[in-house]
Image: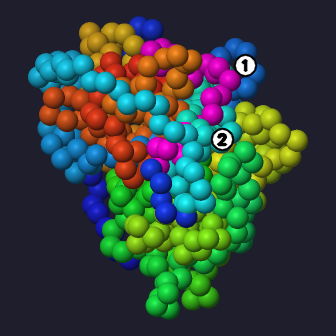
Amino acid sequence: MSELYAAEKGAEAVPVETTAPARTDPADAWAEPEEPADEGNAEPAGITGEPKEPDDADEPGEPEWGREDDAAVPGSGGATGLDARARDGHPAASGEDTYPAEPEDPEEAESPVEPEEPQGPERPDGPGDPDEADGLEGDEGAETPEESAEAESPEDRAGVSGGSAADEPSVTGKFMDRVKGAFSSGDSVREISETVDRPDFHLPGRAYPPDAYGTPLDRPDGTRTPLFDGVPHRDQTQQGALGDCGVIATLGAVAEHRPQDIVDRMKENEDGTYEVSLNEAKSVGFGRYEPTGTVVKLTVTGDLPVYSEIPSVAAFADSAETGVAWAPIMEKAIAGVDRTWSEDKQASWQSTHVRTDAFPTGYTRLNFGTKSSDRAELLVQLTGTPAQVWDVPTGYDHHGRDAKTQFRQDIAEKLADGCPVIVATRHQKKGESPLPGKLVAGHAYELTAINEIGRFELRNPYNARDPKPLTFDELRDSILPNYVTLEKK
């Protein structure tokens, strides 16, 4: 297949120094459980414009990978603002804030906290259920009641992750071209192969979990849901009854900014299975992840978890409403990739995500959510490009730019360069008012655009209920103090 889009223009962002069964409403079903206080999980204000520095001591309960912001949201599209389709005109790095003063919004009454879980066997529309385990995907635990976003541990900051294999320079172009190029140049490219048939999908604590595997991709008329229908885009990703908002938000962001990466990594085989190829990634410290040069090739079967009452609808990532199969098949591949993990990597994940006697596998593992480091690793797996966890600025940099100006300009440059940006909301404190803009606490969102008055637009992975555009102060005070993005291509 030919390239679906051309390389994007834009100045390379430079790190700045700082001084410091019927679907129910997604939001009703997916709030992640709160994770134990992690370093970065409750204090979104503490952010710098540079990569995280490693801490001297490990803190219990913190993920071994990087900071944890675990929430993703469907994007509003940002028709009038700066997004992937508006590559020019983003603020210059002059230090001057070119956005007009932000008008003050009249006092807006926030709606009461959304119910945490859908009632009945109907397929929930949103990610993480209230009963989901604490800590990732929002809390970076499992996307649970309030899809929680997790905080990064000292180890994460130090870049201690379960990565493997030797570093390999990042390359551009189609995925298989990269693999062939590596072989032709004499470099050793290792390939790991595995079959993903029926990953564990038991969701402890859920009131109405799916109860069977079915074939929802097979239609009543004898046809099958196509893997792709045109160019992949973010609106073809929709979180279901699984606490993996961070995964779905990341898939949507990559599909929107780099659709060819999705196409190059997936194909349907003649026997009805699918082949999914992912880049193995490793942490190299300071919140940065790189490809190792190893390709993980997964043969994925087409059966998916369903509710026995509605076997024609996938219980997790949607295909019925989106009309394509790539998102649920990629979600299944990501669930099953842990079959290729070493015992050390399993133990590492378990020590930072959830304390259980046995390592949770498959969809059960995804239900514990993701950390910011997990999302950075996933970006590398999907694109083959290095990814970074960055702190949100809190003070002035050496150019005299305040935190708001730094953040706006950095994000505008990333979006103009076609780089996905993922953030995660923090958990609410007991008795605290709802987060602004109808944000879901402990949930991952894609930051999609900056509008004409400098407000930030987010997309909810529920593929619905996007929050209203937020000011810098509203966003900063509501999210974990970091964001995940790719390096410029």
Q: Amino acid at mark 1?
A: Glu
Question: Quick check: 381 left or right of 191?
Answer: left
Dominant secondary structure (helix, strand or loop) of the stretch shown in magenta: loop
Q: Is residue 183 left or right of residue 239?
A: right
Residue located 20% across and 22% down the image? 105
Secondary structure of the residue carrying tag 1 is loop
Which residue is pictured at 15% across the width and 21% down the height?
103
Q: Is residue 45 magenta?
A: yes
- Tag 2 or tag 1, which sits nearer the N-term? 1
In the rendered image, residue 258, in percent from the top left (x then y), is placed at 37, 56
Quadrant including the N terminus = bottom left
Write down the quadrant of residue 310 in the picture. bottom right
Residue 80 placement (x, y as % from top left): 15, 43
| Residue under label 1 | 59
Queried whether the magenta region covers residue 413, the answer comes back as no
Question: Quick one: 33 or 307, which is closer to the camera?
Answer: 307
Residue at the far right in the pictured view: 357
- How far from the left and from the top, in percent, is residue 347? 81, 41
Residue type at tag 2: Asp
Name the residue beneath numbered marker 2.
131
Q: Position of residue 14 (x, y in %)?
A: 35, 29
Of 117 and 296, the residue lying toward us: 117
